[in-house]
Image (tube, rainbow, N blue to C red):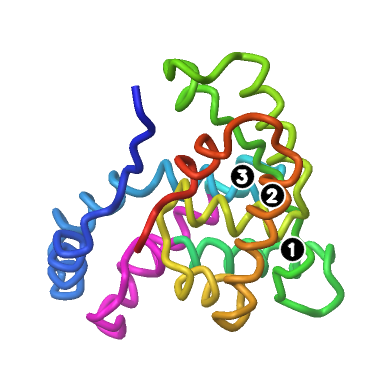
Amino acid sequence: MKTQILRANPVEDNILWNNLILGDEKSFSLLFERYYGDLVNYGNSLSPFAEKVQDCVQDVFTDIWVYRNSLQSSVVVKAYLLSSVRKRIARLYERDHIFRKTSSTDDIAFLLEFSVENDLLDDDYATKEKVSYLNKLLNELPARQKEALYLRYHQALSVEQIADMLDVNYQSASNLLHRGLLTLRKEWKGSFSVIALLFSTTL
């Protein structure tokens, strides 16, 4: 079984988003159901406090509904939601005095453990040992590189969207991705086709 990248449908999302702005509760509910799990998973990668993460995600959706009249109609919905959760968690850190008077997320550790096992174990060339080693390499990457790869592969965001989320320019986001892949390619002892397969999204 080959790896499949699950992508959001930007056209359908945009229709739901614009209906939401007009006050359609069903569209709001559909977007909530579609992205709640992804947003919680991403939030858990930035904070070890699961209940607070769930509160942050729910607060994001609450604000979207309450302030829907002021929302921009032309957004990439998934990227907007992920970025909103990231900013909300940054404010949570600031409120809890983990950071010193800053709402920057630059110093938030990316906690999510990569696991490509489900993607690769059914492939002929992938053994459990190789997959375990690849996971180890992924999880030893610097936090920003790992987060950039997560957003690119698991969330299928473009480099430009990743740059916006991480509050860096396009070249810096591209460099994060490039360095992460370069490290994997250097350390990975198996076929590079496995890594190429993992990170072959073109958006």
Residue with the mark numbered 3: 44
Q: Nearer the viewer, mark 3 or mark 1?
A: 3
* Residue 19 image point, x, y percent: 13, 68
Which residue lies at the image location 43% right of the left edge and 45% below the top edge? 38
Circle 3/circle 2 CB separation < 8 Å: yes
Circle 1/circle 2 CB separation < 8 Å: yes
Residue type at tag 3: Asn
Q: CA distance from mark 1 to mark 2?
A: 9 Å
Marking on residue 73 = none
The C terminus: image quadrant: bottom left
Chain part drawn in magenta: 55-81
Predominant SS along the magenta part: helix
* Residue 83 image point, x, y percent: 50, 67
Mark 2: give few (<14), some (14-19) or many (20+) Cα within 10 Å: many
Q: Is residue 52 placed above or below 65 in the rendered structure?
A: above
Residue with the mark numbered 2: 47
Q: 135 or 19: which is nearer to us?
A: 135
Q: Is residue 85 left or right of residue 12?
A: right
Which residue lies at the image location 13% right of the left edge and 75% below the top edge? 22
Residue with the mark numbered 1: 93
Mark 1: give few (<14), some (14-19) or many (20+) Cα within 10 Å: many
Residue type at tag 2: Ser
